């Protein structure tokens, strides 16, 4: 018994000694998982970890060394802390220090470390585990309700249409989780509205709406998040129902008026494009003005072809191949002529006829046959009955005789092609054919063509625009024409063998020519000139249109905009991608007519628009615009001629080398007055304009004509300084009936030339009063002046008076009155009655001296008998009757009746001392 007690005591002491020895040896660190995932709710403070938080120590079950005393969290600002739930098992807990907010920070990451209790209560020699990573996600709580971005949502719809999406309402939720931060569905609270809303907030109509009904529809919508929490405040929706929107151009006038002389005019100053809010990818619009009915395709210079060539500096030497029919130029008498305002006649070729120009009218070929210019106006009508484009139609066919050789060329139209066949030498060279493919050749409109040949170069100008040949090829296989100078217009001859039957039934073949390939169309102004060709500037000056479309405001042209104008300025195209910039650009499209006196009338306008959208489906269509531009009647210039109605000159002046001037004091004025319109009756006329530089008023022709019998070329003539007229670019034409001056010049030049025109008679001519008239015109006879009449008389010396004058001591004054012939629309010309006063005064002085000499003569002739005095009085009275000038003149003659009575012997003559003294002086002078 004692032995057992001793053994137990020994074992107890050994156990105690072992325990004491073990506590003093903390050999192992605590251990825990390397990574933890945690979740914490916004309304809770405990973090649920996966895996749970446990720390193990291999020193267990030793006290202190095998126990876990705590956990330490590393990370600045971490809103969490860790606590030990069981020191023996090492269980722990992570909890929030305060409330956590998912909206502020949804996730947190930090590290945690466990440590044991060490070797004693004081925790000495404590060991730490490794650092484990903890990821904590804050779970959201549906604490926020959806909120709409706007209080009121507005949209507009067009009546009669169904929309997939009218507009979208949208609400937001401030919760952080997908479950509570998303709006799951929307709801329309207002009942019986023709709209529905889907879960994404898109509203669409359930039936077509009518603007005639309710124009503004209002209803209320609300939103719910996925936690079925309703929006705090509902939203209002307003839908405006608009009338049907049609894409079109707005703000334009169908009628546009153009006042001549006002420069350029904006055609669409307030236009804008209504796209009905449809998305647009690109826009293209073409503005076209139609001027084909104006003269020959458009408004050009109104001067005659001859005057215009001088003004433009064209080379001289043109030969008119289609002149108006006359006894001298009779090869065009069979061609129909179309009435036109132009100076050049328009000939119609019907496809079955042609004309041949006589050889005498052709210019000499010489060595310049390979340098020539053909110019003409052509309106090609094409063929009929299926001929159009299938057969070649010859416009001109010519074989030229050079120095010992022949050349040939043919100008033809073949469909929409112009061809020029040139054969430089018929004996050796091969023909070359030049081709141009042009739309102008087959559009049945007037165009001007100028073909310049400087072989081997050929240039073709159409309406002033140059075109290079599209094709050139050798036609060496053609049969050369007959070597004979010949020109044909509207067709061409062909050399071929003709079969002829003789009496015995035999057939013989002879060579001959047949005419074919006739032209169908209108030709005007066909001319040929050999030698140097005109420059491009000259051709443009001659035939370019003076009216058309233009665009000048390129500085404000929007980005991406393009402008293109065709050479004839009849079409202008705009391209862009923005409706606002496009409308602004179209507002600057202008019309300009640079002529001072343009052709009045209507020019149709057309605006065609093409719109491209992002998708071709449902792309809008803009209708075309049709309007018209009215060129108002220009202010007509009124050319007025004024001058002395009569003049008298001594016989020596008529028979002198210079003759007597017919219109020495001629005055030409140009008055421009406005036409009175119904809405502007108070429009004041312009003041008279006598243009010294000829810009506003330039004359083109003046003609002085003889009134009564024609001049006798043997004794009478009209003359002027021809060299001075030529130096000023004027031409003259003089015959027994008139003297004509032509050429474009200003008023001052024409005044100077016409004042120098003189009338001259021969020594043997019978002298009597001659009457003349003068008139002028401008713009190729478009505006004509009044006719000014004048009378040129001869001073015959002393004229006796009739007995009726003897019975009256009064002085008779006959006023000069000559009413000129006026044109309609011209104001009457007031004749200045004092215009001839200097000439009349001279006549009075001469007559007084003559009367003084008569008194002296009568005093010395007392020996004459009464019969002689009576016959002399009858002769003087007859002379007075055949000289009407003195009866109508403004001169006053005072006759002393006593002198006549003395001459008849009825009263004794008394000679005054003054008369005797004068008689003596005259006798001394005669000696």
Image: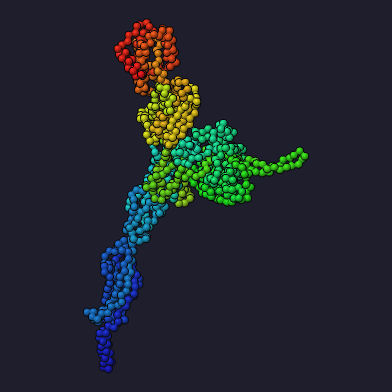
Q: Residue furthest bottom?
A: 3
Residue 76 can be seen in this image: yes
Q: Residue at x 61, y 48 (%)?
A: 427
Q: How is the image coloured?
A: rainbow
Which of the pair 827/87 is nearer the observer?
827
Q: Is residue 66 above or below residue 139?
A: below
Q: Residue at x 37, y 31 (%)?
A: 689
- Looking at the image, residue 515 sits to the left or right of residue 751; the answer is right
- Quarter of the view holding residue 33: bottom left
How far across and down, in percent of the image, does residue 78 sit?
A: 27, 68
Q: Residue at x 34, y 48 (%)?
A: 152
How far across and down, in percent of the image, does residue 307 sit?
A: 46, 36
Q: Is residue 126 above or below residue 754?
A: below
Count every numbered label the image shows and give the total. Answer: 0
How far across and down, in percent of the image, does residue 376 sit?
A: 52, 40
Residue 203 can be seen in this image: no
Q: Is residue 406 above or below residue 736?
A: below
Which of the pair 851/820 is nearer the observer?
851
- Quarter of the view holding residue 274: top left
How far across and down, in percent of the image, does residue 98 sit?
A: 26, 65
Q: Residue at x 41, y 54 (%)?
A: 199
């Amino acid at each position: 018994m004692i032995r057992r007690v001793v053994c137990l005591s020994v074992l107890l002491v050994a156990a105690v000694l072992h325990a004491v020895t073990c506590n003093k040896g903390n050999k192992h660190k605590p251990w825990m998982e390397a990574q933890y995932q945690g979740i914490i709710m916004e309304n809770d403070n405990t973090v649920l970890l996966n895996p749970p938080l446990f720390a193990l120590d291999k020193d267990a079950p030793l006290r202190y060394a095998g126990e876990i005393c705590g956990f330490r969290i590393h990370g600045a600002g971490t809103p969490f802390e860790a606590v030990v739930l069981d020191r023996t098992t090492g269980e722990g807990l992570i909890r929030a220090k305060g409330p956590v907010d998912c909206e502020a920070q949804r996730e947190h990451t930090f590290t945690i470390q466990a440590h044991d209790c060490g070797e004693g209560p004081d925790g000495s020699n404590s060991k730490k585990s490794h650092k484990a990573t903890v990821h904590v996600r804050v779970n959201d709580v549906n604490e926020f309700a959806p909120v709409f971005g706007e209080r009121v949502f507005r949209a507009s719809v067009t009546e009669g249409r169904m929309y997939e999406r009218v507009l979208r309402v949208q609400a937001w939720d401030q919760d952080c989780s997908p479950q509570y931060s998303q709006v799951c569905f929307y709801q329309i609270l207002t009942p019986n509205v023709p709209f529905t809303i889907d879960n994404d907030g898109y509203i669409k109509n359930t039936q077509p709406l009518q603007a005639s009904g309710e124009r503004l529809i209002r209803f209320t919508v609300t939103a719910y998040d996925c936690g079925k929490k309703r929006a705090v405040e509902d939203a209002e929706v307003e839908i405006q129902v608009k009338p049907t929107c049609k894409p079109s151009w707005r703000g334009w006038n169908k009628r546009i008026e153009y006042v001549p002389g006002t420069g350029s005019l904006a055609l669409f100053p307030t236009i804008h494009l209504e796209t009905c809010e449809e998305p647009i990818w690109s826009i293209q619009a073409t503005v076209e003005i139609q001027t084909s009915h104006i003269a020959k395709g458009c408004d050009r210079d109104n001067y005659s072809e001859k005057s215009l060539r001088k003004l433009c500096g064209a080379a001289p030497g043109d030969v008119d191949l289609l002149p108006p029919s006359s006894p001298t130029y009779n090869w065009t008498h069979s061609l129909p002529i179309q009435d036109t305002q132009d100076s050049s006649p328009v000939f119609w070729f019907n496809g079955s006829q042609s004309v041949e120009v006589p050889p005498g009218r052709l210019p000499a070929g010489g060595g310049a046959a390979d340098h020539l210019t053909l110019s003409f106006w052509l309106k090609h009508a094409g063929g009929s009955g299926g001929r159009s484009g299938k057969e070649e139609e010859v416009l001109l066919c010519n074989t030229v005789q050079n120095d010992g050789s022949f050349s040939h060329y043919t100008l033809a139209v073949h469909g929409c092609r112009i061809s020029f066949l040139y054969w430089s030498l018929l004996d050796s060279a091969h023909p070359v054919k030049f081709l141009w493919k042009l739309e102008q050749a087959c559009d049945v409109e007037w165009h001007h063509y100028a073909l310049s040949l400087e072989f081997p170069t050929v240039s073709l100008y159409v309406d002033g625009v140059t075109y290079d040949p599209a094709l050139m090829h050798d036609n060496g296989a053609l049969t050369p024409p007959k070597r004979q100078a010949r020109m044909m217009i509207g067709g061409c001859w062909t050399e071929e063998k003709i079969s002829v039957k003789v009496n015995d039934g035999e057939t013989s073949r002879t060579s001959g020519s047949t005419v074919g390939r006739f032209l169908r169309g209108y030709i005007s102004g066909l001319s040929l000139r050999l030698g140097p060709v005109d420059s491009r500037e000259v051709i443009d000056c001659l035939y370019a249109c003076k009216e058309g479309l233009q665009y000048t405001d390129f500085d404000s042209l929007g980005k991406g905009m393009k402008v293109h104008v065709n050479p004839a300025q009849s079409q202008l195209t705009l391209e862009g991608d923005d409706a606002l910039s496009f409308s602004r650009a179209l507002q600057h499209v202008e019309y300009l007519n640079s002529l001072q006196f343009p052709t009045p009338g209507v020019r149709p306008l057309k605006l065609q628009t093409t719109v491209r959208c992002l998708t071709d489906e449902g792309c809008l269509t803009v209708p075309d615009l049709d309007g018209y531009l009215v060129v108002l009647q220009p202010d007509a210039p009124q050319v007025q001629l004024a001058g002395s109605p009569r003049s008298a000159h001594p016989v020596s002046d008529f028979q002198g080398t210079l003759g007597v001037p017919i219109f020495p004091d001629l005055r030409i004025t140009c008055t421009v007055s406005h036409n009175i319109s119904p809405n502007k009756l108070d429009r004041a006329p312009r003041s008279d304009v006598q243009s010294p530089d000829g810009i506003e008023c330039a004359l083109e022709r003046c003609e002085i004509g003889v009134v009564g019998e024609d001049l006798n070329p043997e004794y009478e003539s009209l003359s002027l300084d021809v060299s001075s007229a030529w130096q000023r670019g004027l031409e003259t034409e003089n015959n027994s009936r008139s003297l004509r001056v032509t050429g474009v010049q200003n008023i001052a030049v024409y005044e100077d030339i016409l004042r120098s025109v003189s009338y001259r008679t021969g020594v043997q001519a019978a002298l009597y009063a001659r009457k003349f008239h003068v008139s002028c015109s401008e713009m190729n006879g478009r505006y004509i002046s009044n006719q000014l009449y004048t009378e040129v008389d001869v001073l015959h010396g002393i004229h006796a008076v009739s007995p009726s004058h003897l019975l009256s001591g009064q002085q008779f004054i006959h006023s000069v009155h000559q009413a000129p012939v006026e044109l309609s629309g011209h104001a009457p010309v007031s004749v200045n009655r004092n215009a001839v006063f200097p000439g009349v005064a001279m006549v009075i002085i001469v007559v007084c001296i003559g009367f003084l000499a008569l008194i002296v003569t009568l005093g010395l002739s007392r020996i004459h008998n009464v019969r002689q005095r009576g016959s002399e009085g009858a002769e003087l009275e007859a002379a007075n009757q055949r000289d009407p000038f003195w009866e109508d003149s403004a001169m006053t003659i005072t006759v002393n009746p006593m002198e006549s009575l003395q001459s008849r012997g009825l009263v004794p003559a008394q000679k005054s001392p003054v008369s005797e003294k004068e008689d003596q002086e005259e006798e001394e002078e005669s000696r």
